Amino acid sequence: MPTDRHPFAPHAARLRPSSGQPAAQARSLTKVFGSGPSAVTALDGVDVDLEAGRFTAIMGPSGSGKSTLMHCLAGLERPTSGQVVIGGTETTSLGDRALTILRRERIGFVFQSFNLLPMLTARQNVLLPLSLAGTRVDEAWFDHVTGVLGITDRLHHRPAELSGGQQQRVATARALVTRPDVLFADEPTGALDSASSAELLAFLRTSVRELGQSVVMVTHDPRAAAYADRVVLLADGRLVDDVDAPTEDSVIAAMRQLGA
């Protein structure tokens, strides 16, 4: 059973207060790639509410649409039709500039590829979203996040001087330094060893439980999904199952039902 190990409670008041809105919602969400006979429907009318202050995992067989769902929810891809709402803001009608600002100020991202800029130090990479937004750095919060992630002594190193696990921690600190409404994680442990994976997942779960952070993670790994509060499963672009309080065994059983 995963265990929470990181002391977050003293900073709990730093997150935005809950509005009672789901962290993310999709209504009749459809995404079609291509056109004509070669068109592929990646999402087929998905309706889902992802609760604020919870850790939700999205799973499904290869080609099920799980990454496309996350990318549409996060504003990284435009859906073909349907609506996406983030924290009460309907994003699918926003123009490109407004959507860019929303992503920068209210959404955090952690990807399997760390997407760190090689010419910047770890500190500069973490603070990049604040620099782009022209936002003042809250040094106490920065020190807390980087301290909990165990990268304080690596902040002046560039990515090439860091291990894979350290680079992922830098990417996670960058995602959390703005205190986003929602943190989206796309296969965040895919490039990590088992020890680094467990540390990152424990950190994400603790950020949910102690800070009220909302986390949505795409994963293919039942062990990773067991850290979540809820697992939603897709098949052929549709939401087909929902597992509350998942365990590794319950997730494996649900995936087997899908033939995965």
Image (tube, rainbow, N blue to C red):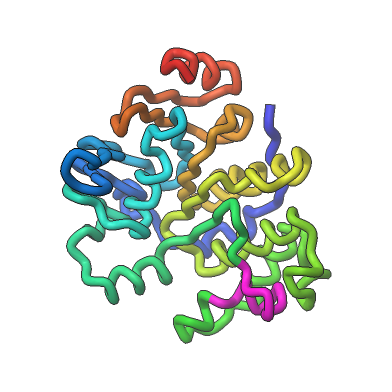
Q: Residue furthest front?
A: 37
Taking the magenta stretch, the answer to whether it contains residue 120 is yes
Q: Image quarter for residue 115?
A: bottom right
**Residue 118 location (% of width, % of height):** 68, 74
Taking the magenta stretch, the answer to whether it contains residue 170 is no
Q: Bounds of the magenta span? A: 116-128
Asked whether 222 or 20 is in front, the reply is 222
Asked whether 98 or 13 is in front, the reply is 98
**Residue 12 location (% of width, % of height):** 56, 57
Horizontal side of 161 relative to 237 (left or right) equals right
Horizontal side of 111 relative to 46 (left or right) equals right
Horizontal side of 140 relative to 176 (left or right) equals right
| 156 w.r.t. 248: above or below | below
Q: Residue at x 75, y 59 (%)?
A: 166
Q: Residue at x 70, y 70 (%)?
A: 143
Q: Image quarter for residue 160?
A: bottom right
Horizontal side of 82 relative to 242 (left or right) equals left
Q: Residue at x 30, y 39 (%)?
A: 42
Q: Image quarter for residue 248?
A: top right
Q: State the quadrant of the N terminus.
A: top right
**Residue 34 location (% of width, % of height):** 25, 48
Q: Residue at x 16, y 43 (%)?
A: 36
Asked whether 180 or 224 is in front, the reply is 224
